[in-house]
Structure formats: C-alpha cells, structure tokens
C-alpha cells in the first residue's frame, strides 16, 4: 500500500482502487506541427502514483495488484474519477480500468 503526498494532504486509495496521473499529451506531431489545446485528446497513458490494499475476495483475503507504484500504464479513455490537488490533476480508478502495463 502506498500513499501520494501533496504538501500536507495524503491520498490513500481504498480497496482495488489506484491513484494515477495522466502523462502529458503531445503538443507537437511527429512531422513538427504544433497542436492547439482544442485538438488534443486526453492521454490514455498514465503513471501509477499509489495503490490500495487490493480487492477483497470472498474468503476474506486481498487479491494482489497487477500494477505497482511507478508503472506506466494504458487506461480506458473515460475510466476513473478526476480530481485536482494543489494544481495537479489525478485520477482514482479501479484496477479493472487498466488495459496494459507499458514496458520499455
């Protein structure tokens, strides 16, 4: 279990929830054209900031997470709940909204 800290406020996801921060959208195309704010889509790539305790199973145990703090992940386009904490935007979402872990 990890927590994210912004100044004095700590965020600790509960259960099978994870806290993520979207990776900034590209401002320029590969060919060098700059994109206006209105043309950018929400990025589907994010970084895991903190994870909860895991999904509670029927037998009372917790299921282990498939992602960990620091992982770069691909998330569903409209998944999660957005919130802002000290000028930084975060998402809290279920691990079910994670499509893949991006590896280099």
Image (spheres, helix red, strand yellow):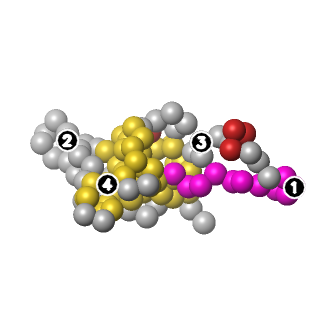
In the structure shown, which secondary structural element does the residue marked by tag 1 occupy?
A: loop
Q: Which residue is mark 4?
A: 51
Give x and y (percent) for residue 20: 42, 52
- Residue 23 magenta-drawn? yes
Which one is in front, 99 or 90? 90
Q: Which residue is mark 1?
A: 31
Q: CA distance from mark 1 to mark 4?
A: 37 Å
Q: Which residue is mark 2?
A: 56
| N-terminal label among 2 and 3 | 3
Callouts 2 and 3 close, C-beta under 8 Å: no
| N-terminal label among 1 and 2 | 1
Which one is in front, 19 or 90? 90
Instruction: Single out the mark in the foreground, 3 or 4.
Output: 3
Q: Residue shown at 77%/55% (left/top)?
A: 28
Give x and y (percent) for residue 58: 16, 35
**Quadrant position of residue 16:** top left
| N-terminal label among 1 and 4 | 1
Which one is in front, 9 or 81? 9
Q: Which residue is mark 3?
A: 42
Magenta segment's dominant SS is loop
| N-terminal label among 3 and 4 | 3
Q: CA distance from mark 3 to mark 4?
A: 22 Å
Q: Which residues are magenta?
A: 22-33
Let me know if residue 11 appears in the view.
Answer: yes
| N-terminal label among 4 and 2 | 4
């Amino acid at each position: 279990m990890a927590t994210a800290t912004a100044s004095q406020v700590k965020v600790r996801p509960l259960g099978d929830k994870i806290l993520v921060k979207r990776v900034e959208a590209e401002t320029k195309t590969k060919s060098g054209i700059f994109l206006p704010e209105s043309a950018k889509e929400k990025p589907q790539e994010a970084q895991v900031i903190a994870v909860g305790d895991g999904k509670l199973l029927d037998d009372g145990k917790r299921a282990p997470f498939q992602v960990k703090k620091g992982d770069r992940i691909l998330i569903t386009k409209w998944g999660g709940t957005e919130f802002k904490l000290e000028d930084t935007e975060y998402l809290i979402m279920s691990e079910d909204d994670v499509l893949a872990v991006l590896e280099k």
